Image: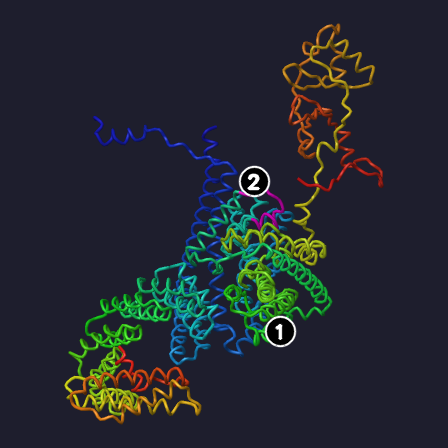
Amino acid sequence: MEPTATHQFFRGLKNLPQPPRFAMSEAQRFLLLSILIGVFAGLLIVCFHCAIDFMSWYTLGTPAGSSWVRTLLSPVLGGAASSLLVLFVFRKATGSGVNHTKAAIYIFEGYVPSSTVAGKFAACSVSLGTGTPLGPEDPALQMGAGIASLLGRLFRISRSSMRMIAPVGAAAGIAAAFNTPITAVLFVIEEVVGAWNAGVLGSIILAAVSAVVVSRSFLGDQPLFRVPLFELRDPAELLVYALIGVSGGLLSVLFVRAIEHLKRRAERLPRWTVYVRSAAAGLLVGLVGLFQPEVMGVGYESIDSALHNHFPWDTMLILAAAKICLTAICFSAGTPGGMFAPSLFIGAMAGGGIGALAHQYWPLATSSASSYVLVGMGTFFAGVFRAPMTSIFMVFELSASYMIILPVMTANMMSYLVSRSLQRSPFFDLVARMEGMNLPSSEEMRERPRLRVEQAMDADTPTVLRADTTVKRAIEEMRTHGAEWRLVWSASGIWSLAELGTLEADGDGQRTISEAIPLTPLPRVYPDLALDSALRQFGPYPALPVCSRAHPDQLLGVLTLEGIHRAYGIGQQPGETSAGPPRLTD
Amino acid sequence: MGAIGGQSRAPVLNGAAQVAGGVLLAFLILLFATVRITQAYRTERRDRAEAHFIQGRELGREQRLPEAIEQYRAAMSIVRTRRDYRQALALALFRAGRIEEAEIHLRQLLEADPTDGETNLVMARIRLQQENEAEARLHFNRAVYGQWTDEPVANRIGARFELAEVLKNTGARTQVQSELLAILGEAPVDDLEVRKRVARLMLENGSATEAANLYQELLKSNDQEPELWAGLGRAEFVRGRYPEAQAAWRSALQWRPEDAALRRDLEVVDTVVSLDPTARRLWSGERLRRSQTLVKLAKDDLEACLPAERSQEVESILATAQETLERRIRPGERTDAIDANIDLAGDLWKARASHCAPTEGPPGPLDLLIAKLAR
């Protein structure tokens, strides 16, 4: 039977070239997964945001503080309910999100329990919605990490990728909660990852961006604060900003020490008090809230009001002091919530208070108080978390003003330096220690001194042989100096190595080195290269040439394993000094 | 080998498909939940914000501004993107005298929409309070030519009136006049209130003739409006046309007999008209009598205000006046005598101005008449 036209058509289709099969690398799959993590985290954080607001509307009412009964009772009941949820239902949802995400990287190979996500969602919605003066960013960060971990496990990504998946989710969570993708990326890099890791940076950015896109598509794209126009009236005004920075630094030290003290005191209390601590802290919040309702809850509306000159200077200073006390008490009592928002609140109010005073009494022209509120926001954050880059870019991102960069840099660095000089550990390191976790300090990781090749190389270079030297002459030279090897220089600009044993195996010794033995090019290292990078290039060689970067053929020294051991202090007796560590970093 | 490889790959693919399917399902469930939650959230948020806004408006109407401000703030803390909430808050803050705070909100509103009429108008008022007239005028102009959602014509006219008031206070007469003429062009022909206000402002701006013309035009169709008659009387009074002013004010009093101020003004103008020797349709005897009365009143006024010790010059002019009053005038000398009397009255008034303290209050009939005769 003759094939019909239809048959021929379908046969033709079968014979068409097949589309290529997509075979994605692990890195590509990780990037795609990052987008998925961002989307999931974004959706979850949108729900979290709505849940907090719903809780707040139905418990505290609008505007907050309009009913004294609700103001007094909501934080008590909310504190009790949230702490009981954590103590009895979601036991793994305790503690700081940042530290648990770090633990996922360094201890649990990317594993974050999924119950953490539900636990943080439920407990923090209740506590923050009922007026606890903590923030939603840290729980959001942990929820993001939890989502990422779950997706990573489902898609069975490799062990090394799995280890870095928690920070990707963390960035997505914080970006969606704070609506600031740059800040989220920087915060995770500075505080969670601890170093610029090119391998994970792309994924963190993709996750943050996709989370913010999802969040904005549901909640709108208006910024967190309506920031008024910023102006620097006079360069001398930077002194006021420096003063705000110093104040922010001092307050941050006070705050961290207060938390340390209160946490230790709380540990000494009888065990049964864990069930009532959050309720008691909530009662204090309610009592203060009767007079200053602005301290209750996350506090972004109050920051926004301060940005618009709603508060006089004395009120702002009172609010800063009250928030410091209440935040420290609630956090130490174990009420679920984060520190991101309170640190912004305290910095904004303290900065605004000082700025408003300066506005009145500073002899030169000054900006309006709102400018100081904006700059002050980052100072307390810089002092508490010791994440200077995040603190600077956060205010920059929030204000979208180029003019603000000088005051922000001045104030935040002052705060950071004051905090560093007076407080040994940054906040998260302190909390990790108190939670019994042995995690690497992000600050130490950032500032860990690195040994360089120049600290390990031998500058007294041994004799260098030319490739056209006869084997006999080379053997004589090595025997004379008792050397086992010599660097060989070829006219083509290649450094290689000739070993005594190999040369001795050559018959009459009249041939040149290049004729007698194969000359394998050696990798070159440079004096400024990190020693651990140089070590990776060592391979089977007994030595590597250290060359000048300006004149690559110029030999500056030789790097040997003995030199490296000496620099690292390996094999030294206690009390002997090694070459490092130097104080300078990369 | 190929068959074995194919068999071993199938479960892996099945597992991956199941995971992908599960993740997709989870995504759809989460998406659905988020959509529903955010819908409920938006509705609740909108309703709560609207309730605060409405309450704020009610409180604002009752002049309970601090409470109204709190309500607007509550509305704005729930929904920050609503322009009308911010505008209401800014207006309430302005009305409550919290200028600095109001200004911040207004600036933000103007950043978002620099053409908004109402925002520009309030900003202009703030600038005026801050004595920054240049910027106030700029914002008034933007208000005049800006966008208004409600009653654009009336609001633009209102803004023009405020601008005209500002210009009037700075003495920019021509610009005031042009604004007032623009209002006349924009306002509906039957809008009596606007036209009355324009006429009043014209009068205050020193354009009495134009004001009188406008009043007369308005009276053609509204001759029972006492305010128009009073305004016309004032315009004619300013122009020195006292009989016309007298007639207009008499008409006004017909409709508003209880107006004491108007009655006082009419009494003054009655006196002026009754003393005026140059009035039309008088026979020469009456003109002479009026000129003599004028001299007598001026002389009495001078004598009453002079101190005990008088200068030679004053004594001389008083003596001349006395002589003039006692002299008998024959009918043929009347015209010259009238002119001489008017001049003498003027001299007496000048002497009074240079030797006596100035009198307070509005000018009296004698002031007005002698000033008119001097013209």
Classify 10 Å Cα crowding around label 2: few (below 14), some (14-19), many (20 and above). Answer: few
Q: Considering the image in quadrants, where does the N terminus of chain A appear?
A: top left
Q: x, y (%) of residue A385? A: 63, 55
Residue that label 1 marks:
A284
Residue A249 vertical placement versus A523 (above, below) = below
Query: Are labels 1 and 2 assigned to the same chain?
Result: yes
Residue holding disc 2: A199
Q: Is residue A86 left or right of residue A269?
A: left
Q: Is residue A199 magenta?
A: yes
- Three-letter code for the amino acid on which mark 2 is drawn: Gly
Disc 1 chain ID? A
Tag 1: amino acid: Leu
Relative image position of residue B320 (x, y in whole percent):
31, 88
Helix, strand or loop under label 2: helix
Q: Which residues are magenta?
A: A186-201
Q: Is residue A115 visible?
A: no
Mark 1, secondary structure of its residue: helix
Query: In which image quadrant can residue A556 be found?
Result: top right
